[in-house]
Each structure stands twice: as C-alpha cells, then as structure tokens.
Amino acid sequence: MHNDQAAGLRAMKGQIKQKVSASAPVLSDESSNDNRVRVIAVASGKGGVGKTNVSVNLGVALSKMGQKVMVMDADFSLANVDIMLGLNTPFNLSHVINGQKTLREIIQDGPAGLKIIPASSGVKRLANLSPQENLGLLKEFERLGTDMDLLIVDTAAGIADSVVTFCQAADDVLIVVCDEPASITDAYALVKVLSRDYSVKNFKLVVNMSRSPAHSNRLYEKFSSVCTQYLKVSISLFGSIPFDQDLRSAVQKQVPVVISYPSSHAAKAFDKMAQNLHASANSDSAGYFGQFVRNFLRM
C-alpha cells in the first residue's frame, strides 16, 4: 500500500511541476526574495519521545542567541506546540489551507523572540493534505523567507506523507529517539522510508531521556551501525538530552526548560545543540527557500 501511495504522490507532483515551472517565477534561482534559510525537520518514528520538546527548546535557545527562528507545528493531527508554550491561537494552518488567512497573519509570538506557526489539532483533513495543498504551504513559507534565519518543522510522528514531504525538502533531518524498543524500531522504519523512497541519506540523531553520556553513545552506535550497514545512510549524534525532573516541571508550567530552568542539565543540552547549529549558521548548510520548494517538487 505504501508503494502505491508513493507512486501516486510522485505522479501528482509531476503534474504540479509542469504547471509551476510554466507560471511561477518565485521558484527562480535569481529571485531577489530568495534568501538563505536553514530548514530543520524534527521527526520521530513514534510519538511520546519528546520530539516537540526538542523543537521548541532548540528554537528558543537559538532565538536567545540572536537567530530569527520560526517553529512550524506540522503535526496536522495532534498539534501541541501552542499547548507546550501556553499560547492562545485563534488561527492556525487550517485557516491558511482554507484560504481564510495567510501564514503571516497566523504567526504567534513565542518566548525570547521565537515565532510560532500553529497547526490545528484533531482536524482529519489536515492529517492527509493533498500534494497541491502541501505545495501551497511551501510556497507560503517562501514568502516569509526574509523574516527568518531558520525554520524548525515539528513533524508528526511516523511516516505520513506530510512527514516525508518536509523531511525530504529540509536541509537537516533530526531523528529523536529514546531507549525503548518501539522508538528504535520505528525510527529505523522512518529512516528506511526516507532513504529508500526519497533519497535522504544524512540524518542527525537526538537521544532523549538519556541516563548518561555513555548510555547515549551506546544507543547511537547501535542504531547508526544498523542503519549504515543495511540502509547505506550517514547518522551523526547531534545531541543527548538527559532525564531531568526540571524538564518535566517545565512541561507542566508550559514554559521551555531553557527559560524556566536555564541552569538545568536539560537546558544545557539544548544550549549545546543550539550552539552547534549557530556555529554553522553562515555555512553552506543553509539552502535557499526556492530550493526548498524545488526539493519538494522532486520527490
């Protein structure tokens, strides 16, 4: 069934590509509005491993460093970025898809200058967007290019079409795991689909709820070894977030741990990941938003 869906998705994108290439100068490499924006997709094989916590805290940590960061809640069935931040969001992506609002009109202000693009939880149609609707969203993002240095896409868990769409189009793919069999098995399945069907070959692993640095390294080495041997992909260890009661307390308060408990072990782990990204912010790792759209069309 997955092969049939993938074939249908690629066929529909081929039709879209013909229409767009004939009438959309916004995709031109020479577009004056096409600036460098690093796009990071944060994904996981299963839910409940802390993916949204990683997206939000990494975004806030980068904002505190002076980066212009947006977090897009791309979990179209179980959106919770706004809940994690205690935000009241009267408008969300469903209003953009329905043509009632533009992306710029639904953006919310988060802590430390972070910008949030909220999704709508529990709306079935948003969980199964057509290729045309996904393309429309990506073109909307292109218009926001001058407003950000970095876009973090908090995807849904699993291998839904929207997940592989954003992962394939992103500059970096972060895979969040914790040390439990279902998390590891499902993360492997996600990497397999992205590498086999969408030619994504480089991944960054984030180990959450780690017991120690040695524990993170062992989990990474085991996961990386299997992926390298059987999938021929590159997996690097991007970060390790320790099991930390302060992180749990921050979630209860609906305040990112990098703000509520800045000296905690978890906050320091997020700061370290943000520093690594910030250090490479001016490198070739950031792509053009026009290329972001073209990567989507090539799926």
Image: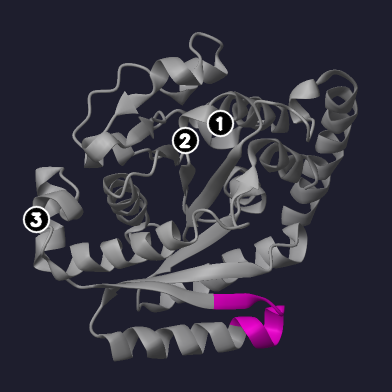
Mark 3 lies on a secondary structure that is helix
Q: What is the crowding at mark 1: few (fewer than 14 residues within 10 Å), some, or many (at least 20)?
A: some
**Which residue is tagged 2?**
148
Find residue 165 and report its horizontal and vertical position in percent: 65, 45
Q: Residue at x 68, y 68 (%)?
A: 201
* Residue plotted at (64% across, 37% down): 289
| Quadrant of the image occupied by residue 83 | top left
Image location (x, y in percent) of residue 174: 49, 62
Tell which of 180 and 198 is nearer to you: 198
**Circle 3 sits on which residue?**
249
Residue 99, compared with residue 174, is above or below; it is: above
In x, y percent, where is residue 133? Answer: 65, 26
Query: In the rendered image of this protein, does residue 20 appear above or below residue 111?
Result: above
Q: Is residue 81 above or below residue 109?
A: below
Label 3 and label 2: CA atoms lie apart by 30 Å
Q: How many angstroms separate mark 1 from mark 2 (CA)?
A: 6 Å
Question: How many numbered circles are shown?
Answer: 3
Numbered mark located on residue 229 in the image: none
| Amino acid type of the residue tagged 3 in the rendering | Ser
**Earlier along the polypeptide chain: callout 3 or callout 2?**
2
Between label 1 and label 3, give the one nearer the viewer. 1
Q: CA distance from mark 1 to mark 3?
A: 35 Å
Stretch of the chain drawn in magenta: 227-235
- Name the disc covering residue 145, or none: 1
